[in-house]
């Protein structure tokens, strides 16, 4: 059966850890001390291993030559989302308040892993399509997706469908777009 070597997994882990660290730094700079978001190396590594085991199984059963054919961004994105949501590799450090205070309804810190999964998927899709502009979901679509990722059990087929949809719309926009910001029908924006 096809599998990825330890060296390949380590290479993907380093790239994934770097992506997670940069994401945490960006979030921390925006939150200005409300909490600190940190990547957990062990959980990140488990996320990479589980993702690439799924990709290896997919390649083995669905590709004629798994060694010669790279999986596409849709598959990689969907499997990364699946395992980021399961393992939750980004951790929140907060000051323990005594007595505890009621959390603000505007505190979206519970959704940091879901948001990271979305950002990671969008980056992979944009990279494969050669899109230099930032790809993002509209605010409305982002909130619906965060809700779905946090509160619903989504199977891989649902994630594959969602990622394919984003890929197709980004590809369409990239072919006909002029590089300016535009909101696509289903809420993906290139800016």
Image (spheres, helix red, strand yellow):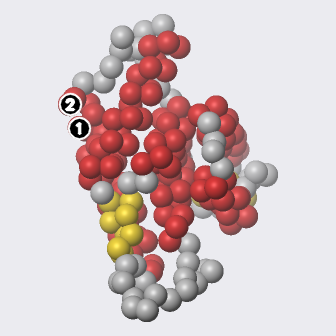
Lateral position of residue 28 relative to residue 146, left or right = left
The image shows residue 31, relative to residue 177, as above or below, that is: below
- Residue visible at 33% across and 35% down in the picture: 49
Separation of marks 2 and 1 at Cα, in angstroms: 5 Å
The image shows residue 100, relative to residue 124, as above or below, that is: below
Q: Which residue is mark 1?
A: 10
- Residue visible at 36% across and 84% down in the picture: 96
The image shows residue 98, relative to residue 65, as above or below, that is: below
Q: Nearer the viewer, residue 135 or 54?
A: 54
Q: Quadrant of the N terminus?
A: top left
**What secondary structure is found at the residue carrying circle 1?**
helix
Q: Which residue is mark 2?
A: 7
Q: Residue furthest top?
A: 64
Give the image location of residue 100, x and y in percent.
46, 87
Q: Is residue 166 visible?
A: yes
- Residue visible at 35% across and 83% down in the picture: 95
Q: Are marks 2 and 1 in contact (CB under 8 Å)?
A: yes
Give the image location of residue 73, x and y in percent.
51, 35
């Amino acid at each position: 059966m096809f599998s990825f070597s330890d060296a390949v997994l380590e290479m993907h882990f380093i790239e994934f850890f770097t992506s997670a660290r940069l994401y945490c730094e960006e979030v921390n700079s925006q939150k200005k001390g409300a909490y600190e978001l940190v990547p957990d190396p062990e959980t990140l590594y488990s996320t990479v291993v589980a993702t690439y085991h799924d990709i290896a199984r997919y390649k083995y059963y669905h590709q004629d030559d798994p060694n010669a054919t790279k999986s596409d961004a849709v598959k990689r994105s969907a499997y990364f989302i699946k395992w980021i949501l399961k393992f939750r590799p980004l951790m929140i450090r907060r000051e323990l308040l005594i007595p505890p205070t009621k959390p603000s309804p505007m505190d979206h810190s519970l959704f940091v892993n879901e948001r990271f999964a979305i950002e990671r998927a969008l980056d992979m899709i944009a990279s494969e399509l050669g899109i230099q502009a930032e790809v993002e979901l509209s605010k409305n679509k982002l909130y619906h997706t965060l809700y779905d990722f946090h509160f619903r059990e989504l199977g891989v087929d649902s994630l594959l469908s969602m990622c394919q949809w984003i890929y197709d719309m980004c590809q369409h926009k990239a072919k006909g777009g002029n590089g300016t910001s535009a909101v696509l029908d289903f809420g993906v924006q290139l800016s």
